[in-house]
Image (cartoon, coloured by chain):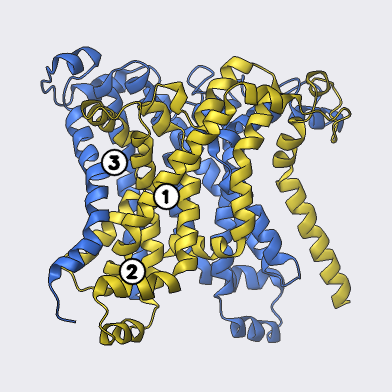
Amino acid sequence: MQKRKEWILNILGILFVLIFLFPVYWMIITAFKSQSEIFQSTPTFWPKDFQFTSFIDIFKDNVGQYFLNSFMIAGLATILVLVLAVPSAYGLARFKVKGKNPMILLFLVTQMLPATVILTPLFIVFNNLSLLNTYWGPVLTCATLGVPFSVLILRTFFLGIPKELEEAASIDGCGRFRTFIRVIVPISYPSIVVCAAISFFFSWGDLIFSMTFNRNQDLWPLTAGIYNAIGRYGIEWNDLMAFATVSVLPVIVIFVILQKQLVKGLVSGSIK
Amino acid sequence: MKKGRWGEYLFIYPAVIFMLLLIGYPLIYNIILSFQDVDLNSLATGDKHFVWFDNYKALADQDGFGISVWNTIVYTLGSVVFQVVIGFLLALFFSMKFKLASFLRGVVMISWLIPLTITALLYKFMMGSGEGIFNQMLMGIGFIDDPIQWLSNPDIALWSVIIANIWVGIPFNMLLLSTGLSNLPEDVYESASLDGANWFQKLFKITIPLLRPVLLVVLMLGFIYTFKVFDLVFVMTGGGPINSTEVLSTIAYRLSFNEFQFSLGAAAANILFLILLVVSVIYLYMINKDEEA
């Protein structure tokens, strides 16, 4: 009886996930179809004539450059997030500094702000600093998404580390900074990786910052490239879906590698 | 541990200063901007004079502004209610301990991680009236006779975007509620079973009351994240057809960056910000009260 229930639950669960993630399957499978097959009145759940033409098309159409831009923007933003957030989270967890609570509140509130509020002012500021049409506009603004999130997650983690570790290190003559680099960073490595991944995802998905600050197409990430392609490709869904598949690939790969830690990290970051 | 304070400041302050420069300063600038008269011409000449509430008045008369406020509310409530209910049911399902539960729960997260631009494009494709899989399937099983105009009918388009948004939001709600469920005390359920309580009684008498704090957090976070949504609407419909899916964030963007009426755009963004601020303050007050309790 128990065994049968177990079977039924597993099968129900698999069925649900298959239905829920069907759009993702549909996206990937459409990328390998021909234009005529997409417009048949009866949909095919496996391409009759499996082809790579769409992928070849989009790579002729600058997708390589978009991909590189997405990587540059998300990569630089992630590095910036870690450099700023890891020490700050540690400081807010360990040091008795005036104004600690307002600062924590600042990070909490900034997570809730709409991007639209900062767009116009930053557009004017970046224009004055000649930062429009460079990577820096989207890199700096994407980092504002990752910093508060990471500070809050990592602070919770650092609060849980026993103080004895740092005390031992300081007896051995390590200064505060060396203790941080030698002791704290290595043991919090898994949490830091989660923050890096999430910050990377945030930046990888950005459309509004790149579109606003960079009119120069050579700097566009995949998202802006896709948005633009929707108008140009019209209803060439196989090319558009190939474009989408290429854009989602890194996200899925990173997610599969880090699944367990990510789920844990997300929960502690959103509740606390 | 008696060392100069400078070291401590160096740890904490760079991130704080970064956020103040890139979020705090623009935020104040945006408020000032909304009280001035700034468009493309005055931006070039540097002539900025104060007009106080004129922009807000002009905004109220702006075509489509009223509807965008209404749409934002419908969009948010529609999304959040369904996300939370479905997320909760799934969390309950996955809380039954079977072998694949935690693996499957993790896999579902993929829909939440896909960039919104791509989700929007994907739903645009699936909701195509002729070639879209939604209509093909619904007509295939005889559920409808004529194709539904998901994105081109002004009465339906907003709900089509809501459907896409619910799909994005379900995993996150499920995850938070699953965590809440796993922290509930087991012994309460055991004694309830001894008293002969059935599944429904346990759900409504024990689970939901105990989960109330988590449910409130999930509702609030859902509200905050949905209320400011931009990419999904912008890419799926661009606010159309005829303003039927225009929301506060898209109208603010359009005013600033398509029509270059920076002050009007700033005013629209501020109204969005103001509502979010109120909700955020309530949210923070709630989690604070929770921690003290």
**Disc 2 designates what residue?**
B289
| Residue B247, image x, y percentages | 44, 30
For label 1, count other residues whose C-alpha is less than 10 Å away and answer few (under 14), some (14-19) or many (20+). Answer: many
Quadrant where the image shows the C terminus of chain B: bottom left
Q: Nearer the viewer, residue B34 or A139?
A: A139
- The kind of secondary structure element at disc 3 is helix
Q: In this picture, is B248 found above or below B195?
A: above
| Residue A18, image x, y percentages | 76, 49
Q: In this picture, is B126 found above or below B290?
A: above
Q: What residue type is labelled 2?
A: Lys
Disc 2 versus disc 1: distance between alpha carbons?
Answer: 33 Å
**Disc 3 designates what residue?**
B274
The blue one among the chains is B
Q: Is residue B216 in view from this perspective?
A: no
- The kind of secondary structure element at disc 1 is helix
Q: What colour denotes chain A?
A: yellow
**Which chain is indicated by disc 3?**
B
Q: Nearer the viewer, residue A60 or A98?
A: A60
Report the disc number at residue B198: none
Q: Which amino acid does label 3 sit on?
A: Leu
| Residue A8, image x, y percentages | 84, 64
Disc 3 versus disc 2: distance between alpha carbons?
Answer: 23 Å
**Disc 1 designates what residue?**
A78
Q: In this image, A167 relative to B201: left or right?
A: left
